[in-house]
Amino acid sequence: MGEHTATSGGAALYAALPWGVTAAAGLTSDGGVHAATTHGPLRPREAAARTVAEEVGEARRSGLLRADQGLRVLLESDLPVHASLGRTAAVGAAVALALADLAGGPPPEGAAADRRAVLAARPGHAVRVNQRTLRTRVLPFDLAAEGLRLVVVDTGALPRRDPRPAHTAAVEAAQEVLGPLRSVGDLRAALASLPDPGQRDRIEFEATEAHRLNAAVGLLRAGRAGEVGPILSASHLSLRGFGLPSPDVELAAETASRAGARGVRLSGWAGTVVALAPEERVERIGAALNRAFTDRGRVPPRVRAALASAGAHRLR
């Protein structure tokens, strides 16, 4: 939750999945950056290749690597590329951790909220990150103890264009009128001062999402993770205010809810839904999703169940 409030400096709540990115890395003496997957070399403009190059550049700026030192890295992943499940953050965290190990430096902290979450995550816990200060807090999220699972539904649906630039521009323009959203006391009056209805919808979401996230954090701190489902669903419904969930995402969310999920929410900006569900309902939810998509002539989504898992760590 909360990842859509980055522009206004809100907090976000993350949980690590048991899937991710594996990076096998070694230093070179040619100063180059060589990135590949098990399927072949990566083109420099690909997101993973850019992320590897950024991590090497940061290591040089911080003095961790010399200018004549380069990196050769082989990546393997079981996370989809465009599913808003943190694949880019996982690549960056794995490479940063490998660089620190190879060069004998301190563990990396991460320069972005999702990267901080990847590095701080622990099994059975969630991570709250302040997206303005990057301060993190690890919170209990022991779903196994309550017989629950996160059901991750990847529909593969992608928006026709990236919705993030429009959202960022609208929120930044509104803050020029209102000031920082965290300092707004009277939300109704603040919304009335904005002439654009679309802008008002986005600001209302940003402001109210902070309250939903705080409520979820309060439940986690109290050891009541099983009760956050309605908050997830309320957050998802609020995202409809500016047309974010696609038809496939809406079909997945509604189907999972009817099949027994306690709460559902779009993850990120693309086509993945995360549902909180009792373990005994997972198979039923998967079957319902397969049937709902097939009946409409659509490709069924990939459905996987998970618990909050470990973040970035060394394998060997």
Image: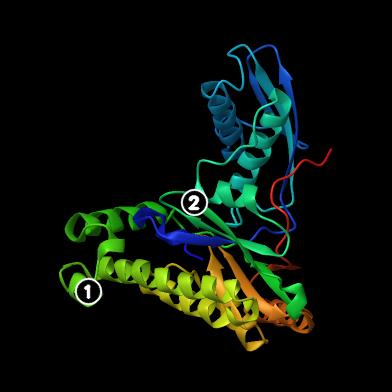
In the rendered image, the vertical position of residue 210 relative to residue 89, given as above or below: below
Q: Residue at x 26, y 69 (%)?
A: 200
Local crowd at mark 2 within 10 Å, few (<14), some, or many (≥20)? Answer: few
Q: In front of the other: label 1 or label 2?
A: 2
State the quadrant of the C terminus.
Answer: top right
Question: Which residue in the protein does label 1 denote?
Answer: 186
Colour mapping: rainbow
Q: Quadrant of residue 276?
A: bottom right
- Disc 2 on helix, strand or loop? loop
Marks counted in the figure total: 2
Question: Which residue in the protein does label 2 denote?
Answer: 135
Mark carried by residue 194: none
- Disc 1 on helix, strand or loop? loop
**Residue 198 x/y as whole percent:** 27, 68
**Residue 91 x/y as whole percent:** 64, 41
Local crowd at mark 1 within 10 Å, few (<14), some, or many (≥20)? Answer: few
Q: Answer with left or right where residue 94 lies relative to residue 168.
A: right
Q: Quadrant of residue 16?
A: bottom right
